[in-house]
Image (tube, helix red, strand yellow):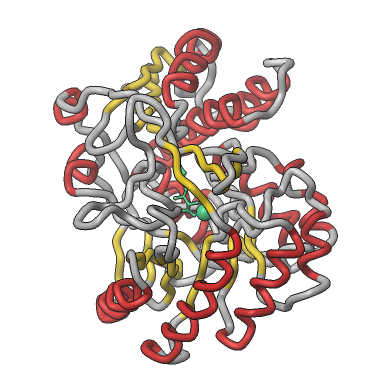
């Protein structure tokens, strides 16, 4: 059996911060796990280095479930984004090790492929509706069959999901949080116009998605869902904050637009009520923030009972290690829905060489043993960490609001 002899945390910042856990076994096998929590990276790095790594040394790396339970129940202080991201990193690394020793890609260890490849969606954003549509057409021509649309809101200097002109969209910035101003009224006027223009320009053979990013009240979300029904969105995401899972009942009463939620969830308990009451259609919890492959499989199995499908988060603050793990998971689950795919920049891809590939609007993790991703430590060392925060959002009257 492969005994864990070392585990190291590697922090690198090729355009944005990533935290990676590398576990080493006595036979030389190594495994990688993503431990990136955007804006709180060093909290997870410290949790791993100070509290988790000492407990891993000497353990049998094949005992994934036992180690998961040890780190979850053994911490006493259960759940939360930092804890579950740390557990996720260990879990991903152990599945990587198991696959390498077995000589099999991780999806084969999870029951094999339940589909040929994973449908993915990309991001189209722009300051104006016209800019957004132009980008969406370009992505459709690149082969994407599903595109998320986010555009600027007239009267607001900036808004979620829209990159600064000429720059890639990376929301974490600054040595302290930047502040943006929000107006629900202005926003609710522009999104239906965006979708009307998108259907006019792109037709009906492409899925269109939208991320509300936690900013509406339930009844406002019902209004948006109803206004978008003529344009058949694939989903509206994070339409209202989900601490009160039952809030989605109010949205359901007013619209048949599909609802997605969960990228900020870190355990099955965050989603149980939503899933059991069929208040959502897609669950977006991820391998990196919801306890790894082991826990995400439990969430997907519960969701499957209620015809809820997976729609996992996949922004660029999830490293290529997480993307690889997400694709092995997505290929194997019966109730896969869609996988978010924001391509990383070239520097990041160089730090994390990987086997996963994009083809014709879908992605496949590849058949390399394990997760099929590695880390170039020399390149990683060349990109020093720099603290960065996600923005803070306020209403026009200064009220602190969800970003
Ligand atoms: C967004 C994310 O991709 C999405 O759906 O919600 O870009 C989110 O804003 C970031 O992951 C936060 O770090
Ligand atoms: Mg989102």
Q: Quadrant of residue 202?
A: bottom left
**Measuring 34% from the left and 35% from the top, which residue is drawn there?**
173
Relative to 391, residue 186 above or below = below
Tell me residue 73's x, y (percent): 73, 21
Relative to 39, residue 273 above or below = below
Tell me residue 399's x, y (percent): 62, 40
Tell me residue 288's x, y (percent): 50, 39
Does the rendering let one see residue 376? yes
- Camera-side residue: 151 or 8? 151
- In the displayed structure image, the side of residue 157 where residue 13 appears, left or right: left
**Measuring 48% from the left and 47% from the top, which residue is drawn there?**
181
Name, please, the residue furthest toward the front. 397
**Measuring 38% from the left and 64% from the top, which residue is drawn there?**
123
Tell me residue 387's x, y (percent): 34, 24
Relative to 150, residue 166 above or below = above
**Measuring 33% from the left and 64% from the top, which residue is drawn there?**
127
Does the rendering let one see residue 360? no
- In the displayed structure image, the side of residue 379 where residue 75 appears, left or right: right
- Camera-side residue: 344 or 199? 199
Relative to 219, residue 169 above or below = above
Q: How many marks?
A: 0
């Amino acid at each position: 059996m492969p005994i864990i002899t070392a585990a190291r945390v590697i922090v690198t910042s090729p355009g944005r911060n990533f935290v990676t856990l590398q576990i080493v076994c006595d036979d030389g096998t190594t495994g990688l796990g993503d431990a990136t929590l955007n804006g709180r990276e060093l909290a997870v790095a410290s949790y791993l280095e100070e509290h988790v790594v000492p407990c891993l040394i000497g353990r049998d790396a094949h005992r994934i479930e036992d180690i998961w339970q040890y780190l979850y129940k053994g911490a006493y202080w259960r759940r939360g984004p930092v804890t579950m991201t740390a557990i996720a990193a260990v879990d991903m690394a152990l599945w990587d090790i198991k696959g390498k020793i077995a000589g099999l890609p991780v999806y084969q260890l999870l029951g094999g492929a339940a589909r040929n490849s994973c449908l993915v969606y990309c991001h189209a954003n722009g300051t104006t509706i016209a800019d957004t549509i132009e980008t969406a057409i370009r992505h459709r021509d690149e082969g994407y069959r599903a595109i998320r649309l986010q555009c600027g809101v007239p009267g607001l200097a900036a808004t979620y999901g829209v990159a600064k002109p000429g720059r890639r969209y990376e929301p974490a910035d600054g040595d302290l949080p930047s502040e943006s101003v929000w107006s629900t009224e202005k926003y609710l006027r522009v999104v239906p116009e965006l979708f009307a223009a998108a259907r006019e320009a792109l037709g009906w053979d492409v899925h269109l998605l939208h991320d509300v990013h936690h900013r509406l009240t339930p009844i406002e979300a019902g209004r948006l869902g109803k206004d978008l029904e003529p344009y058949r969105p694939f989903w509206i995401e994070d339409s209202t904050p989900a601490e009160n899972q039952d809030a989605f009942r109010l949205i359901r009463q007013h619209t048949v637009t599909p609802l997605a939620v969960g990228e900020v969830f870190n355990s099955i308990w965050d989603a149980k009520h939503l899933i059991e009451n069929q208040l959502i259609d897609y669950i977006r919890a991820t391998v990196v923030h919801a306890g790894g492959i082991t826990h995400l499989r439990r969430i997907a199995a519960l969701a499957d009972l209620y015809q809820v499908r997976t729609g996992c988060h996949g922004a660029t603050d999830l490293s290529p290690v997480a993307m690889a793990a997400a694709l092995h998971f997505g290929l194997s689950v019966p109730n896969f829905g869609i996988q978010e795919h924001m391509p990383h920049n070239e520097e990041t891809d160089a730090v994390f060489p990987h086997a996963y590939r994009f083809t014709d609007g879908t992605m496949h993790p590849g058949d390399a043993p394990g997760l099929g991703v590695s880390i170039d430590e020399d390149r990683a060392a060349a990109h020093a960490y720099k603290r960065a925060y996600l923005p803070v959002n306020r209403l026009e009257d200064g009220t602190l609001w969800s970003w």
